[in-house]
Amino acid sequence: MHALTRITKSEWTLLLREPTAVFFLLGFAPLLLIILGLVPSFREASEDLGGLRVIDLYTPIIITMSIAMLALQALPQTFATYREQGVLRRMATTPARPAMMLGGQLIMFGLVSFAVMVLVQGIGVFAFDVPVPRSIPVYLLAYLLSVASMLSIGLLVAAVARGGKAAGAIGSVLFFPVLFFAGLWVPREGMSAILRRISDFTPLGAGVQSLSDAAAGHWPQLLHVAVMLVWTVGAGAVAARFFRWE
């Protein structure tokens, strides 16, 4: 545990040395919410959206966007680069095994994601009157399932990519379709029936709807919970099968 803590702190220090990465991983999502919240029409209820406001719909979407940025771009590229540069191979000869590096990365990105979620939700509530989730434990459960499913996919990308550039390219290719079905360009409420059904079976489409349900005081739908669990277990199992330390 001591070695894992030290590795996590070391990875956090390395992250803070990259101002661009810090901005996109920590600052971009809150800034996007503020920009959207400053649009007057986005703070007005719309009959087309079931009486909701655009800013209400986009709060969980932006939270899941930040998860996708961490899971599909930061995590796989960092870990694949370490493997490409021989960092993991050298660690195998020390008491700090490569698995600890993986654990440190997951802990660090998990904490970053949680911090962004709290910040985005806090800005939404205090600046734009976004309702506080009625069931916070259920909301956190839906959030954790979203994180787990996306991090599993990120590990799968890291497992199959030959190097950091390849991991970045694969992550970018996956990033935009995942966000589309999460509702970043067209909220799920505005999608056609076919697109919304496809969205139900994507990790972030299920995640956004589960967060919205929890915010309204309802349990996530069983389908969406099952979808996130299947992505978590399935992608995680394939990643474990093909993962290479060197």
Image (cartoon, helix red, strand yellow):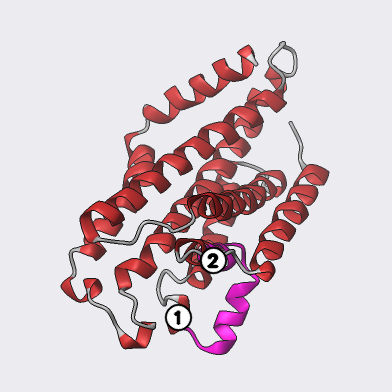
Q: Which residue is mark 2?
A: 218
Instruction: Estimate the x, y position of residue 85 in percent, counting from the top left.
Output: 61, 29
| Tag of residue 233 | none
The three-letter code of the residue at mark 2 reads His
Residue 202 in magenta stretch = yes
Report, in whole angstroms, how far the alpha carbon at label 1 lies from the one at label 2: 17 Å
Residue 113 in magenta stretch = no
> 244 and 223: which one is in front?
223
Numbered disc total: 2
Q: Is residue 111 above or below residue 213?
A: above
**Of the residues tagged 1 and 2, which is closer to the observer?**
2
Which of marks 2 and 1 precedes in the sequence? 1
**Quadrant (top left/top right/bottom left/bottom right) for the N terminus:** top right
Q: Is residue 204 above or below residue 193?
A: above
* Segment colored magenta: 191-210
Q: Would residue 47 be found to the left or right of residue 198 on screen?
A: left
Q: Would residue 242 be found to the left or right of residue 43 on screen?
A: right
Residue in the image at 55% along x and 15% along y: 6
Secondary structure beneath label 2 = loop
Residue in the image at 51% along x and 67% along y: 213
Image quadrant assignment for residue 25 = top left
> 135 and 119: which one is in front?
135
Residue in the image at 37% along x and 82% along y: 49
Residue in the image at 22% along x and 71% along y: 43
**Quadrant (top left/top right/bottom left/bottom right) for the C terminus:** top right
The three-letter code of the residue at mark 1 reads Glu
Magenta-colored segment: predominant secondary structure: helix
Instruction: Estimate the x, y position of residue 204 in percent, counting from the top left.
Output: 55, 63
Image quadrant assignment for residue 199 = bottom right
Given the current orientation, which residue lies at the most extreme right position? 241
Q: Which residue is mark 1?
A: 189
